[in-house]
């Protein structure tokens, strides 16, 4: 026992070991962190995994635990999600990297998982953020499920493999980290929505609505300038560290990011730009078609109806959303998904799995469309040109020689 | 028999009648224009239709709601708007996942005075019958004969769980909330009951059971959580009645003192708080 405890202590200094001790697992974890700005990858102690693996297997035998198994059918507190992110990296080091790309008002790290097959050239990418609004717990649950699902299937499903080959996925399981943590405090804080930054100018309520804080017709509609309001857009655009973190990461990559998802609840809606009622996206019709197809894919799973429309038309006019900003800087396909149910933020845990399954189908349908549009229409054009040329050549040879 | 109802699948009704042209709710003076024009067709996936549907839902719950059945909604099929919205919708009973047939409703929003509650007329076709009298009688007798008063709290809990014994009281809270939500609704709201902080059974001398509820409502448009204290009565014969309703201001810097309204019947009293910051 002393040997185990000593090993565990030493390992915890260098390895990303679970913070949640009621589920102690003893799988070797290698830390691979990529610093967002310097792009350097630091691989720590992975070579030592084999050496320590023996000790850890012994540990596991003593404890009698199963191999590490994350439960995707319950809601997880922040610490468990952080541990899980490290686990995703350690179990899939070839395709998953952890990127710390910002921090919150209360100085917590905002991280994403970058998932994709390695490539020598810059790849196109898909962005997904969950948990912009703290009380929408099904949203982070979906991001975790999505990651799990693509990692589970890419080795056996050639379509998913192709997606990971051609695209990188940037998945942020919890964007509003401070807010999410606050909703776990007790049953009076469960329905918090905003960030936890203080009010300004003598207004003594806390928090800004992150989804009104982006530079997209900021402050113009669907907001309240009372800092106590749940749709307070901040004292200025990008007043919130969390919003700036997104912008600092996405903006430099805007020519590579082709698809932008932001996941929310509730309402069962698939929304596309814009939230501002007087702005129409140039690809409105295409966005509507993609969304309709996604709604159809969702319905095929468990029969649930998701309503489709632009944000302003189907929900309410609102400016400053992350989706609007993404579209405005040129990311062509941007969507807000509002998940189950139709009346409550406190979705029962027995609905987590069916919600994730149907949402996965919807998101997958969108990604497939976007992927095929980028990677196949060029090919189709090329081969069409080739055939036309061949036929023309044959024709002229046959009839004019 | 009483049930708790949600709207599913709205379908089309259009009638050509003179009306005030539909414009954004905040356009002043619009209501003065009396033009003979056809009813404006509403996109069923756009919020004017879904909000009107939600109001019809609250109305139906106030008429037919009970602790033992709850209907769910799924998508407007079609809608038309003058000052009033005319809707056809399918009704679904949620606890049994049962289709209840077709209803048609008219929801009239008073544009000139947003504090006047919407007027709703609604008729439902034959299949609309949920026999819950056995369960209601059973619950009623259990509570009448119990030696102590019942109470509950934090429904659902943070992970969405509701104890099966608490479920009828969740539904009862929902039905009682519908009285409030019906009164509080206008074209710029979309109200749902979000949470029951607690409920307590009160002593009564008559046949009605009485409960005090602390309820949280959610308005989708302002995204606010609205705290309401309700005193309600229920019996299988008497149905659900809201006796007193009181709104708690949400934050310390809210100017408005809380208002008290007595009786469940629509009163001329001003009772609406500053719910809409949009």
Image (cartoon, coloured by chain):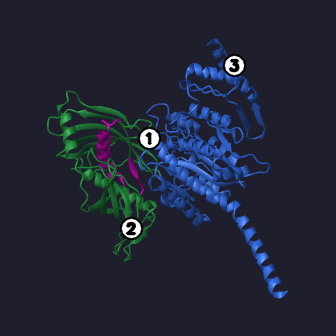
Chain colours: A blue, B green
Q: Position of residue B56 (x, y in %)?
A: 33, 57
**Mark 1 neighbour density, 10 Å: few (under 14) some (14–19) many (20 or more):** few
The circle drawn on residue B81 is 2
Q: Which residues are magenta?
A: B163-192
State whether the magenta stretch is mostly helix, strand or loop: helix
Residue in the image at 25% along x and 59% along y = B127
Residue B197 lies left or right of residue A29; in this view the side is: left
Residue B121 lies left or right of residue B43; in this view the side is: left
Q: Which element type, helix, strand or loop, lies under badge 2?
A: strand
The answer to whether the residue labelled 3 contacts the one labelled 1, judged by CB atoms less than 8 Å apart, is no
Q: Which element type, helix, strand or loop, lies under badge 3?
A: helix
Residue A227 lies left or right of residue B152; in this view the side is: right
Which residue is the site of mark 1? A350
Q: CA–CA distance between discs 1 and 2? A: 38 Å
- Which of the image's four quarters has the N terminus of chain A? top right
| Chain of the residue under the numbered disc 3 shown in the image | A
- The verdict on a common chain for dots 3 and 1 is yes
Residue A41 visible somewhere in the drawing: yes
* Residue B108 belongs to magenta span: no
Residue in the image at 61% along x and 43% along y = A152
| Chain of the residue under the numbered disc 2 shown in the image | B
**Mark 3 neighbour density, 10 Å: few (under 14) some (14–19) many (20 or more):** few
Position of residue B167 relative to residue A67, above or below, is: below
Residue B260 visible somewhere in the drawing: no
Q: CA–CA distance between discs 3 and 1? A: 39 Å
- The verdict on a common chain for dots 1 and 2 is no
Which residue is the site of mark 3? A10
Q: Nearer the viewer, residue A254 or A85?
A: A85
């Amino acid at each position: 026992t002393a040997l185990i405890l000593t090993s565990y202590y030493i390992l915890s200094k260098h390895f990303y070991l679970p913070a949640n001790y009621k589920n102690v697992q003893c799988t070797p974890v290698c830390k691979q962190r990529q610093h967002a700005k310097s792009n350097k990858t630091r691989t720590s102690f992975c070579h030592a995994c084999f050496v320590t693996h023996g000790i850890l297997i012994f540990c596991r035998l003593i404890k009698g635990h199963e191999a590490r198994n994350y439960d995707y059918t319950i809601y997880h507190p922040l610490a468990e999600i952080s541990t899980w992110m490290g686990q995703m990296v350690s179990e899939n080091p070839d395709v998953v990297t952890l990127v710390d790309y910002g921090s919150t008002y209360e100085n917590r790290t905002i991280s994403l998982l970058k998932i994709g097959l390695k490539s020598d050239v810059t790849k196109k990418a898909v962005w997904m953020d969950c948990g912009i609004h703290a009380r929408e717990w099904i949203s982070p649950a979906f991001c975790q499920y999505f990651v799990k699902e693509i990692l589970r299937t890419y080795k056996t499903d050639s379509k998913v493999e192709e997606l990971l080959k051609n695209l990188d996925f940037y998945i942020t399981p919890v964007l509003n980290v401070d807010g999410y943590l606050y909703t776990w405090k007790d049953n009076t804080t469960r329905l918090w929505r905003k960030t936890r930054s203080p009010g300004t100018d003598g207004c003594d309520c806390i928090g800004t609505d992150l989804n009104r804080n982006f530079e997209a017709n900021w402050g113009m509609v669907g907001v309240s300038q009372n800092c106590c309001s749940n749709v307070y857009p901040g004292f200025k655009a990008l007043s919130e560290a969390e919003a700036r973190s997104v912008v600092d990461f996405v903006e430099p990559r805007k020519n590579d990011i082709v698809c932008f998802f932001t996941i929310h609840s509730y309402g069962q809606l698939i929304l596309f730009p814009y939230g501002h009622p007087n702005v129409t996206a140039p690809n409105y019709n295409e966005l509507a078609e993609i969304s309709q197809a996604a709604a159809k894919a969702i319905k095929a799973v468990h029969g649930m109806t998701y309503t489709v429309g632009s944000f302003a038309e189907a929900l309410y006019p609102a400016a400053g959303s992350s989706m609007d900003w993404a579209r405005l800087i040129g990311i062509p396909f941007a969507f807000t998904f509002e998940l189950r149910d139709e009346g409550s933020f406190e979705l029962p845990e027995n609905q987590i799995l069916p919600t994730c399954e149907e949402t996965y189908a919807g998101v997958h349908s969108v990604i497939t469309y976007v992927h095929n549009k980028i990677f196949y229409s060029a090919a189709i054009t090329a081969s069409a040109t080739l055939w036309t040329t061949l036929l023309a050549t044959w024709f002229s040879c046959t009839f004019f020689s | 028999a009483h049930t708790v109802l949600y709207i599913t699948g709205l379908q089309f009704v259009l009638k050509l009648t003179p009306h005030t042209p539909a414009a954004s709710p905040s356009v002043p003076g619009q209501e003065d224009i009396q033009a003979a024009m056809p009813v404006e067709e509403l996109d069923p996936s756009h919020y004017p239709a879904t909000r009107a549907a939600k109001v019809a839902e609250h109305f139906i719950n106030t008429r037919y709601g009970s602790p033992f059945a709850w209907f769910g909604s799924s998508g407007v099929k079609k809608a038309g708007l003058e000052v009033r919205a005319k809707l056809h919708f399918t009704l679904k009973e949620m606890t049994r996942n049962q289709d209840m047939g077709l209803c048609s409703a008219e929801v009239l929003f008073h544009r000139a005075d947003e504090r006047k509650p919407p007027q709703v007329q609604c008729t439902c076709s034959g299949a609309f019958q949920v026999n819950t009298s056995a369960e209601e009688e059973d619950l009623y007798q259990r509570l009448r004969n119990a030696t102590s008063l019942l109470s509950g709290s934090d429904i659902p809990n943070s992970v969405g769980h509701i104890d099966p014994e608490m479920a009828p009281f969740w539904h009862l809270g929902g039905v009682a909330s519908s009285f409030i939500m019906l009164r509080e609704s206008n074209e710029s709201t979309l109200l749902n009951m979000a949470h029951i902080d607690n409920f307590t059974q009160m002593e009564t001398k008559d046949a009605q059971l009485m409960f005090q509820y602390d309820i949280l409502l959610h308005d989708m448009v302002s995204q606010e959580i609205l705290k309401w204290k309700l005193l309600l009565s229920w019996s299988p014969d008497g149905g659900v009645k809201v006796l007193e309703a009181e709104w708690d201001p949400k934050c310390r810097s809210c100017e408005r003192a809380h208002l008290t309204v007595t009786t469940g019947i629509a009163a001329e009293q001003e009772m609406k708080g500053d719910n809409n910051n949009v």
